Amino acid sequence: MNFLRTASSLALRPSGHILTRRTALPATAFAVRYLSDSTKKTIEDAITRNKLVVFMKGTPDAPQCGFSRAVMQILTVQGVDMQNSLKSFNILADEELRSGIKEYSSWPTIPQVYVNGEFVGGCDIMLSMHQSGELEKLLLKEGLVEPEAEENPRA
Amino acid sequence: MSTPVTSVTIESLTEACNDRLGATHVEAKDISGGCGQNFELKIVSPMFEGKTTLQKHRMVNEALKDQIALVHAFSQKSFTPAQWEALQQ
């Protein structure tokens, strides 16, 4: 590593500006950063402009992974309007987004669910919130599902 | 720091949970059907006390970071000893 650092600073000595930037590199070289400014902006715009955002493998109609499919099923069962209330990103179609979202959320797996700009969790958390009733509460609070109509026993 | 992990096994996951999360009980299952790329973990630890689900998952993700990076799929359930006890009833 020392050898590398010396080599690169020697090579870059002519430009002081680049040299300072370069010398900062080895510290971050191991924790490779994937999140570019443009990807970060894409993510931030998406989660601030949409109440419900899912970063997933595949599309809501054709999920490409069981975990992504499970999240779609949970949201459908909860009564979310999948056409109009859900914004989804197919990370399989965008390699930069795929690695970028993991870094942005500090979360190692896909799918990832955001509600009202906040990271809620992945498939495990969605499933446990679905079972505990927490998810229904959250979706109701954010207006993503309609309260269930009062039960009117048919006469 | 322990030695770098090169392959993920039930043993390596269990060991990391014991070492880094003070787990009192770990159930690790290889649900990949042979390829060793898909794991399901149940972890019981007093360190989860007072944490939200998201916080617990983040703790597990952090503790198992190097191993999760090596597998295709990973699923976790985390419990405090009291929650686990209640489940066993």
Image: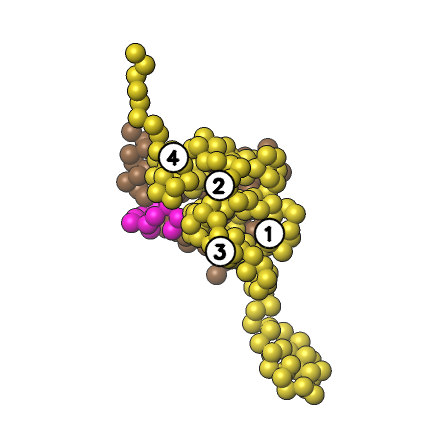
Q: In the image, which is nearer the foreground, mark 1 or mark 3? A: 1
Do discs 1 and 4 share a chain?
Answer: yes
Using the numbered discs, state the Cα–Cα distance from disc 1 to disc 4 in whole angstroms. Answer: 32 Å
| Corner quadrant of residue A148 | top left
Q: Which residue is drawn at 48% across and 32% down?
A: A76
Q: Which residue is drawn at 30% across and 26% down?
A: A150
Residue displayed at 32% across by 33% down: B87
Tell me the magenta residue range.
B44-55
Q: What is the drawing colour of chain A?
A: yellow
Q: Mark 3 lies on which chain?
A: A
Residue at the farthest right position: A11
User: x, y percentage for residue A35?
Assistant: 57, 61
Three-letter amino acid code of the residue under disc 3: Ser
Label 3 CA crowd tier, 10 Å (few <14, some 14–19, many 20+) = few
Instruction: Output the chain of dot 1.
Output: A
Q: Given the image, what chain letter belongs to the residue carrying mark 4?
A: A
Q: Distance between the residues labelled 4 and 3?
A: 32 Å
Q: Name the residue under label 2.
A: A85
